[in-house]
Image (cartoon, rainbow, N blue to C red):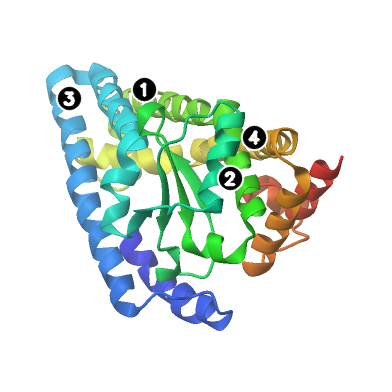
């Protein structure tokens, strides 16, 4: 599917993003990103798929339990070490230099009891003018990553407000909730797969006369699409609720005004739609629209 969508991704990057001044990606970077992504997909995705097939041959319909354990372990591993192992393949990261910004971030983290030793700056400007910041990992592997574009676009108090929002996600256990929910959904999906995998009708439904694991896997993927849409809607709804909660946390532990101005700047710089249709928000948005967030912060 990624091969099919690559031409559209190319058009989006080098025509649409270029037209509005967002694109900083070179054609070489675009190609290398794709090649690295496909190689990782072949190694990691292929390895996990091979394990699932082996579990099926070894354990029969109970294969889903073993497959679930492997996928759950992999999910936890990636949440812990994604920034250390995967990000460096695509971007350069360096520790945030000593200065007033680092001091303000550390002061806020100490104030709210959030242990934070790893603060990194990533070269997001290598690909786009859009800004971002995120937390990754948990426990001792917890770290915050700031895009260099975020540092150049926002004032220091605005950056701290954005980080306060991210700390809110952590303090409200949104990170743990998302990880656990992802693992549970994966288990549910694999359980359903175990019910369908031996049904010859699944293979026949996609035009394969001789039933096989591989054909049933493809057929199940098609049949599961409606369920995936439903779980996606639920997760988007919860995500929007979590965004309000994280905004409230930032307002209560830092300040509302710098978060409001930072959200406005980020929205302006990315040309976000200020008045999306509520139905489209319900179907596709993981974050509330800017106006709704500002209204909530001013309440």
The residue under label 2 is 104
The residue under label 1 is 191
Circles 3 and 2: CB distance less than 8 Å? no
Which of pointers 4 and 3 lies earlier in the amino acid sequence? 3
Of residues 94 and 129, the one drawn nearer to the viewer in this rendering: 94
Relative image position of residue 14 (x, y in whole percent): 45, 79
At x 30% / y 60%, what residue is drawn? Answer: 90
Of the two numbered discs 4 and 2 in the rendering, the one whose residue sits closer to the viewer: 2
Which of pointers 4 and 2 lies earlier in the amino acid sequence? 2
Q: Is residue 230 visible?
A: no
Which of pointers 4 and 1 lies earlier in the amino acid sequence? 1
The residue under label 3 is 55
Count neighbours of disc 4 (C-alpha within 10 A) and say few if under 14, some if 14 to 19, many if 20 or more. many
* Quarter of the image that includes the N terminus: bottom left
Of residues 291 and 100, the one drawn nearer to the viewer in this rendering: 100
Quadrant of residue 205 in the image? top left
């Amino acid at each position: 599917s990624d091969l099919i969508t690559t031409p559209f991704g190319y058009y989006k990057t080098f025509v649409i993003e270029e037209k509005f001044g967002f694109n900083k990606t070179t054609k070489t970077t675009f190609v290398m990103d794709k090649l690295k992504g496909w190689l990782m997909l072949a190694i990691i995705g292929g390895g996990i798929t091979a394990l699932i097939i082996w579990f099926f041959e070894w354990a029969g319909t109970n294969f889903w339990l073993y497959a679930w354990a492997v996928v759950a372990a992999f999910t936890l591993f990636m949440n812990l070490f994604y920034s250390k192992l995967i990000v460096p393949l695509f971007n350069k990261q360096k520790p945030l230099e000593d200065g007033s910004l680092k001091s303000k971030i550390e002061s806020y983290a100490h104030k709210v009891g959030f242990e934070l030793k790893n603060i990194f700056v990533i070269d997001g400007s290598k690909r786009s003018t859009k800004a971002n910041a995120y937390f990754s990992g948990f426990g001792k592997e917890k770290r915050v990553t700031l895009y260099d574009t975020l540092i150049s676009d926002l004032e220091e108090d605005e950056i701290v407000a954005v980080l306060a929002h991210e700390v809110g996600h952590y303090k409200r256990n949104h990170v743990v909730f998302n990880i656990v929910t992802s693992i549970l959904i994966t288990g549910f999906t694999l359980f359903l797969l175990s019910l369908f995998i031996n049904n010859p009708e699944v293979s026949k439904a996609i035009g394969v006369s001789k039933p096989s694991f591989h054909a049933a896997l493809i057929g199940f993927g098609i049949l599961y699409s409606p369920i995936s849409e439903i779980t996606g809607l639920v997760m988007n709804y919860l995500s929007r609720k979590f965004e309000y909660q994280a905004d409230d946390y930032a307002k209560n532990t830092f300040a509302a005004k710098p978060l409001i101005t930072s959200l406005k700047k980020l929205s302006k710089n990315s040309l976000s739609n200020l008045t999306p249709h509520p139905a489209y928000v319900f179907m596709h948005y993981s974050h509330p629209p800017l106006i709704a967030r500002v209204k909530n912060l001013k309440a």
